[in-house]
Amino acid sequence: MGYEIRSRSTHVRSFLYAYDGMAKMELDGVAYSLYPGCVFHFPLNQSLVIHSSREQPFCYFTVRHDYKFIEWEGTSIRCSEPEDQVFPFDCVVPMPDKETMLRDMQNLHGLWNGKKTGYEWETKLAFLNILQRVGEQQHEQNDAASQSIVQSMDYIRNHYREPLERETLARQASLSSSYFSVLFKKHAGCSPVQYITKIRLDQAKLLLRRKSLSISEVAREVGYQDPLYFAKVFTHEIGVSPRAYRNM
C-alpha cells in the first residue's frame, strides 16, 4: 500500500533480487539502500519496512523458503530450527552481473510456475546455485572491502584534524554508506564516527598533558572548531573535562 511494505515481525524467510527501481529498507531498525542488481533477504521475526516511490517503483523477485537441520541417529530423525542467520552472506549484497542474475531468477520463476515433472528438484537446484554465486560474490567483495576499510582507518588517523563525514569516507571506499558502516564496525569494532572520536580524543589527551596549548587550541588541533562541543564530547567519552584531565 502506498509503495510501502511494513511488517512488525517477518513470519517467513525470504530471498529477493531487485531488478528495477529504488527503495529504502529497515530491518530491525537497521537501514539499507536497495537498488537494481542487489540481493537481499529476511530472517524470521524481524521488524521490516521497505519504502519505494511512485517515481521509482521497486521491482523484485521473491523466493520464500524454509530451512531446517535434520538430526539422524539410527532410525530416529529429528528436525530442528537453525539460528536466524542461515545464509553465509550479508542482508544486502550487490551482484555486478545483473544480466546473469536476472536471467537465472527468470528461469527459477519459470521452473516453479511451469510445474513440469521433476520441477521440485530443478527449482531447488537452481536456487542453491544462485545462493552459491551470492556467497562467492560476498567472499570476493569482503576481500576488496576489507582492504578499503583498512585504508579508511589509515586515512582517518592521518587526517583527523580535517572534517570527516561517513558519506565521504564511504565514497572513497566505493561503498554505500550503510554497507561501509557495517563493514567498518566488523573490522574496527566500532562505528566510523566512534573511531574518528577515539583517534581525536587520544591525540587531545597527549596535547593536554603538554600544557603548551590552550584547550581551544587543542580542540582545533584535533578537528573540533567549537571548543565547547569538544569539551562536551571529551567529558562524555573520558569521564572528566579537558581542564580536569590536564590537572590530573
Image: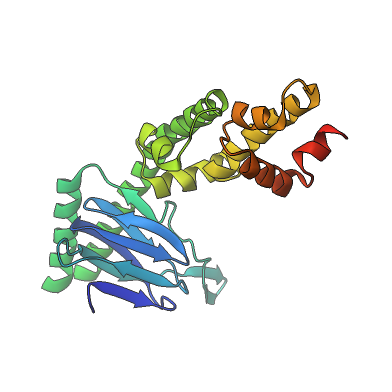
Instruction: Tell me the quarter of the picture where residue 176 sits.
Output: top left
The answer to which of 80 and 11 lies nearer the viewer is 11
The furthest residue to the right: 248
Residue appearing at x 16%, y 54% in the figure = 102
- Residue 122 spot, x, y in % from top left: 22, 63
- Residue 170 spot, x, y in % from top left: 40, 39
- Residue 116 spot, x, y in % from top left: 12, 72
Say if residue 116 shows up in the picture.
no
Rendered image coloring scheme: rainbow
Image quarter hosting the N terminus: bottom left
Say if residue 154 shows up in the picture.
yes
**Above or below — where is 49 with respect to 24?**
below
Residue appearing at x 40%, y 42% in the figure = 167
* Side (left or right) of 196 relative to 176: right
The answer to which of 240 and 42 lies nearer the viewer is 240
- Residue 126 spot, x, y in % from top left: 24, 58
- Callout count: 0
Residue appearing at x 78%, y 47% in the figure = 239
* Side (left or right) of 121 relative to 244: left
The answer to which of 17 and 23 lies nearer the viewer is 23
